[in-house]
Amino acid sequence: MEIEVLNQNGSGDSKVSLPESIFGQQFNEDLVHQLLTTYTSNSHQNTKGQKNRSDARGGGKKPWKQKGTGRARAGTIRSPIWRGGGVTFAYKFSSLKPKKINKKMYRSAMRSIWSKLAEEEKIVAINEINIDEPAKSSQVKKILSDLGLNKALVVLSKNNEGLNKASKNLTECNVQTVSSIDPSALLKAEKVLITSETVNLLTEVLA
């Protein structure tokens, strides 16, 4: 399978061949689902928790006497029915054992994802991305506009500091590398922008 490689200004430059072993595989939905659930679970910090009535600060003194006030009985101002009180069924942080997916399954699932992107014609190839100093968001917007893209996930073979700086505040451009790619972002991407170097590295890593 061949796709056209574009210049930064959007003009055609050459063609690159997408290896069948990476971009022409059958989509394995079960395996991809296992990869996504593992990635998502391991991404959680597991540090969030809620406070029940005993954890909430204050509330040690009884607000008013038990009888004779005409008001409902109250033992603490940190009751869950009071504003500022604790949570009734508070979630407690518990350390979870990280999930694991072996390398062979990971590579197979990633091949499935890249094959699906190629099948749906979501992959756009570019020879290189050059960002002039100082890096500005307008440069990235112009590149996307010249390529005819509204939103794109950029996958590079190595880190591009200039592109990272220029796209930092842009929601329409997400920059990642092959070594630290988010499979869920890859599946959800409207378009995936890659370079010839990215294709070569993917062939080495996922073969």
Image (cartoon, helix red, strand yellow):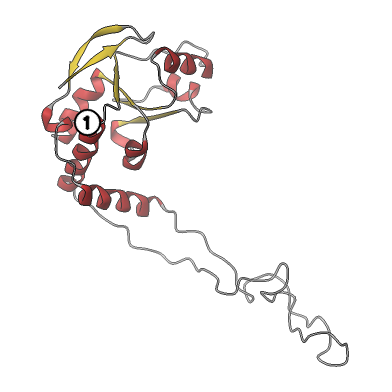
Which residue is pictured at 19% across the width and 37% down the height? 111
Question: Residue at position x 26%, y 26% from top?
Answer: 121
Q: 137 or 125, which lies in front? A: 125
Quadrant where the image shows the C terminus? top left
| Depth order, front residue of 118/40 | 118
- Indicate the amino acid at tag 1: Glu
Q: Quadrant of the N terminus?
A: top left
| Image quarter of residue 67 | bottom right
- Residue 77: image location, x then y, percent: 75, 75
Please indicate whether residue 54 sits to the left or right of residue 42 in the image. Answer: right
Image: 43 above or below 195: below
Q: Residue at x 37, y 63 (%)?
A: 96
Name above or below for residue 197 compared with residue 55. Answer: above
Residue 114 sits in quarter: top left
Q: Farthest right residue? A: 69
Q: Quadrant location of residue 125?
A: top left
In this picture, residue 93 sits left or right of residue 52: left
**Residue drawn at x 26%, y 32% as measured from the top left:** 117
**Residue bearing mark 1:** 119
